[in-house]
Amino acid sequence: MSDSLYDRYGRPAVVGFVLVLAGLSVASAYLRVSSAGLAAAGDAVVSLYIAAVVVWGTFREGYDTARFRIALYGVLVLWGSADLIAGAEAPLAYLFLVGGSLLIAWESYSSPRDGRKPASER
Protein backbone atom coordinates (compact mmCIF):
# COMPACT_ATOMS: atom_id res chain seq x y z
CA MET A 1 0.00 0.00 0.00
CA SER A 2 1.65 3.19 -1.12
CA ASP A 3 1.18 6.33 0.87
CA SER A 4 1.55 9.41 -1.30
CA LEU A 5 2.61 12.79 -0.06
CA TYR A 6 -0.88 14.17 -0.78
CA ASP A 7 -2.54 11.46 1.32
CA ARG A 8 -0.17 12.10 4.18
CA TYR A 9 0.03 15.90 4.19
CA GLY A 10 -2.17 17.42 1.49
CA ARG A 11 -5.58 16.06 2.48
CA PRO A 12 -5.27 17.06 6.17
CA ALA A 13 -4.06 20.51 5.11
CA VAL A 14 -7.07 20.97 2.79
CA VAL A 15 -9.47 19.75 5.49
CA GLY A 16 -7.91 22.10 8.04
CA PHE A 17 -8.11 25.02 5.62
CA VAL A 18 -11.78 24.28 4.86
CA LEU A 19 -12.60 24.11 8.56
CA VAL A 20 -10.87 27.42 9.26
CA LEU A 21 -12.71 29.13 6.39
CA ALA A 22 -16.04 27.64 7.49
CA GLY A 23 -15.43 28.88 11.03
CA LEU A 24 -14.61 32.36 9.74
CA SER A 25 -17.76 32.32 7.62
CA VAL A 26 -19.93 31.42 10.61
CA ALA A 27 -18.26 34.09 12.76
CA SER A 28 -18.66 36.75 10.08
CA ALA A 29 -22.34 35.85 9.61
CA TYR A 30 -22.89 36.20 13.35
CA LEU A 31 -21.07 39.54 13.49
CA ARG A 32 -22.96 40.87 10.46
CA VAL A 33 -26.34 40.03 11.97
CA SER A 34 -25.37 41.35 15.39
CA SER A 35 -24.16 44.67 13.97
CA ALA A 36 -26.66 45.29 11.15
CA GLY A 37 -29.66 43.39 12.47
CA LEU A 38 -32.15 41.66 10.21
CA ALA A 39 -31.02 43.70 7.21
CA ALA A 40 -27.97 41.44 6.98
CA ALA A 41 -29.87 38.19 7.54
CA GLY A 42 -29.91 37.31 3.83
CA ASP A 43 -26.16 37.68 3.48
CA ALA A 44 -25.65 35.69 6.67
CA VAL A 45 -27.82 32.84 5.37
CA VAL A 46 -25.88 32.77 2.11
CA SER A 47 -22.56 32.67 4.01
CA LEU A 48 -23.76 29.84 6.23
CA TYR A 49 -25.06 27.90 3.23
CA ILE A 50 -21.74 28.26 1.40
CA ALA A 51 -19.85 27.06 4.48
CA ALA A 52 -22.21 24.11 4.91
CA VAL A 53 -21.95 23.06 1.26
CA VAL A 54 -18.15 23.20 1.24
CA VAL A 55 -17.85 21.29 4.54
CA TRP A 56 -20.37 18.72 3.26
CA GLY A 57 -18.38 18.37 0.02
CA THR A 58 -15.13 17.95 1.92
CA PHE A 59 -16.26 15.35 4.42
CA ARG A 60 -19.19 13.55 2.87
CA GLU A 61 -19.89 14.01 -0.81
CA GLY A 62 -16.74 15.01 -2.66
CA TYR A 63 -16.31 17.83 -5.10
CA ASP A 64 -16.77 15.92 -8.34
CA THR A 65 -20.37 14.75 -7.92
CA ALA A 66 -23.51 16.13 -9.52
CA ARG A 67 -25.18 16.65 -6.13
CA PHE A 68 -22.32 18.83 -4.93
CA ARG A 69 -22.36 20.91 -8.11
CA ILE A 70 -26.13 21.37 -7.87
CA ALA A 71 -25.80 22.47 -4.24
CA LEU A 72 -22.99 24.83 -5.22
CA TYR A 73 -25.05 26.34 -8.05
CA GLY A 74 -27.79 26.81 -5.48
CA VAL A 75 -25.49 29.39 -3.89
CA LEU A 76 -25.96 31.61 -6.94
CA VAL A 77 -29.75 31.28 -6.78
CA LEU A 78 -29.76 31.95 -3.04
CA TRP A 79 -27.43 34.93 -3.41
CA GLY A 80 -29.49 36.49 -6.20
CA SER A 81 -32.71 35.89 -4.25
CA ALA A 82 -31.28 37.42 -1.09
CA ASP A 83 -30.19 40.53 -3.01
CA LEU A 84 -33.60 40.93 -4.66
CA ILE A 85 -35.44 40.43 -1.37
CA ALA A 86 -33.19 43.05 0.25
CA GLY A 87 -34.18 45.49 -2.49
CA ALA A 88 -31.01 45.54 -4.58
CA GLU A 89 -32.43 45.65 -8.08
CA ALA A 90 -28.98 45.29 -9.62
CA PRO A 91 -28.46 43.36 -12.86
CA LEU A 92 -25.97 41.14 -11.05
CA ALA A 93 -28.73 39.84 -8.76
CA TYR A 94 -30.81 38.84 -11.78
CA LEU A 95 -27.74 37.30 -13.41
CA PHE A 96 -27.06 35.17 -10.32
CA LEU A 97 -30.69 34.13 -10.06
CA VAL A 98 -31.17 33.22 -13.72
CA GLY A 99 -27.64 31.89 -14.25
CA GLY A 100 -27.76 29.71 -11.15
CA SER A 101 -31.16 28.35 -12.14
CA LEU A 102 -29.89 27.51 -15.62
CA LEU A 103 -26.80 25.79 -14.22
CA ILE A 104 -28.95 23.71 -11.85
CA ALA A 105 -31.26 22.75 -14.71
CA TRP A 106 -28.31 21.84 -16.93
CA GLU A 107 -26.62 19.75 -14.26
CA SER A 108 -29.88 18.00 -13.41
CA TYR A 109 -30.49 17.28 -17.08
CA SER A 110 -27.02 16.07 -17.97
CA SER A 111 -26.01 14.07 -14.90
CA PRO A 112 -26.58 10.31 -15.12
CA ARG A 113 -28.58 8.60 -12.40
CA ASP A 114 -28.94 4.92 -11.61
CA GLY A 115 -26.33 3.95 -14.17
CA ARG A 116 -28.36 5.37 -17.06
CA LYS A 117 -26.97 7.54 -19.81
CA PRO A 118 -27.43 11.30 -19.45
CA ALA A 119 -30.63 12.62 -20.98
CA SER A 120 -28.63 14.44 -23.64
CA GLU A 121 -27.21 11.11 -24.93
CA ARG A 122 -30.45 9.09 -24.99
Image: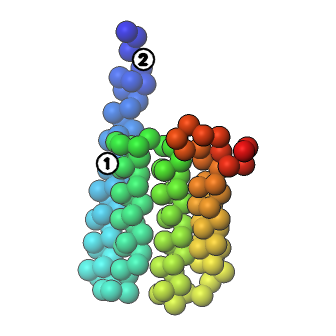
Left or right of 94? Residue 53 is left
Amino acid type for the residue under numbered disc 1: Leu
Secondary structure under the numbered disc 1 in the rendered image: helix
Dot placed on the residue nearer the N-terminal end, 2 or 1:
2
Q: Residue at x 38, y 81 (%)?
A: 40
Per the image, the residue denoted by label 1 is 19
Tell me: residue 29, above or below residue 107. Answer: below
Secondary structure under the numbered disc 2 in the rendered image: loop
Q: Residue 24 sits in which quadrant? A: bottom left
Per the image, the residue denoted by label 2 is 4
Picture coordinates of residue 82 (x, y %)? 47, 79
Q: Residue at x 39, y 64 (%)?
A: 49
- Image quadrant for the N terminus? top left
Could you classify mark 1 by the number of other residues whose Cα lies within 10 Å: few (under 14), some (14-19), or many (20 or more)?
A: some
Picture coordinates of residue 26 (x, y %)? 30, 63
Q: Residue 80 sits in which quadrant? A: bottom right
